[in-house]
Amino acid sequence: MFFVFTALFTSVHLGTLAETLALITWNVSWPALIVQARLVTSGKQYEEAVADLGTPPLQVVRRVMLPMLTPAIFASAVLVFSSVVDDFVLVDLLNSNSSNTPMSVYIYSQQRGGNGGPALNALGTIMLVMSFVIVIIGYLGYRWMTRGERGSRVDALATLAGSD
């Protein structure tokens, strides 16, 4: 990413914009995979049934597809958030100055010989615990949003594999 922004895309200078674009580029695969898996397992029958009733395509997306994809969107948002909070390598490489340094980069840069002091250790622990809490809340939220849809795991794997 450092090479991309310093040699290829020279119009984007190092700083917040480069950090944001790099994190989006790096983490966009997680929502794509999760939402795609949700689309594959849900099937087309709901979309086709609503379209057969004469519903316009935008209403099909808004009233049928979006509510079905909400758990996958929520789960991918939680996953990406927990990844971005702790991803300091990209942010450290693309940082232009110390005025917008994220907390993970600050913690990493303050460690001298493995001892950054008790306040820094407490801050790192709080960040780690909050990441775990967010992931657990995301998992519970996903399970709650999909509580009526649980079937056999074998059926879901067969759907993903493409067999009927």
Image (cartoon, grey):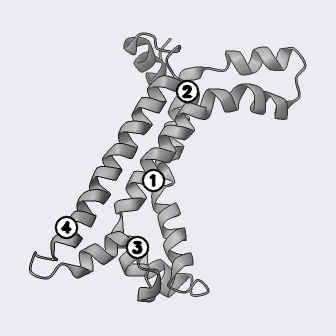
Task: Kindly indicate whether the residue at mark 1 contacts the one at mark 2 (C-beta within 8 angstroms).
Answer: no
Q: Which circle, 3 or 4, is nearer the viewer?
A: 4
Q: Position of residue 57 (x, y in %)?
A: 84, 31
Circle 2 is placed at which residue position?
40
* Marks 1,3: beta carbons within 8 A: no
Mark 2–mark 3 distance (CA, rounded to whole Å): 37 Å
Distance in Å between CA atoms under marks 2 and 1: 24 Å
Foreground: disc 4 or disc 1:
4
Q: Quadrant of residue 56?
A: top right
In the displayed structure image, the side of residue 112 where residue 24 appears, left or right: right
Q: Give the labeled residue for mark 4.
A: 121
Q: How crowded is mark 3: few (under 14 residues within 10 Å), some or many (20 or more)?
A: some
Crowding around mark 2 (Cα neighbors within 10 Å: few <14, some 14 to 19, many 20+) is: some
The residue drawn where x is 44% and y is 38% is 138
Q: Which of marks 2 and 3 is nearer the N terminus?
A: 2
Quadrant in which the N terminus is drawn: bottom left
Q: Where residue 153 is drawn, which disc sits there?
A: none
Q: How far apart are marks 3 and 4 (CA)?
A: 16 Å
Q: Name the residue under label 1.
A: 81
Q: Which callout, 4 or 1, points at the residue further toward the start of the chain?
A: 1
* Alpha carbons under labels 4 and 1: distance apart: 22 Å
Task: Give the number of the disc on residue 102.
Answer: 3
Q: What residue type is labelled 2?
A: Val
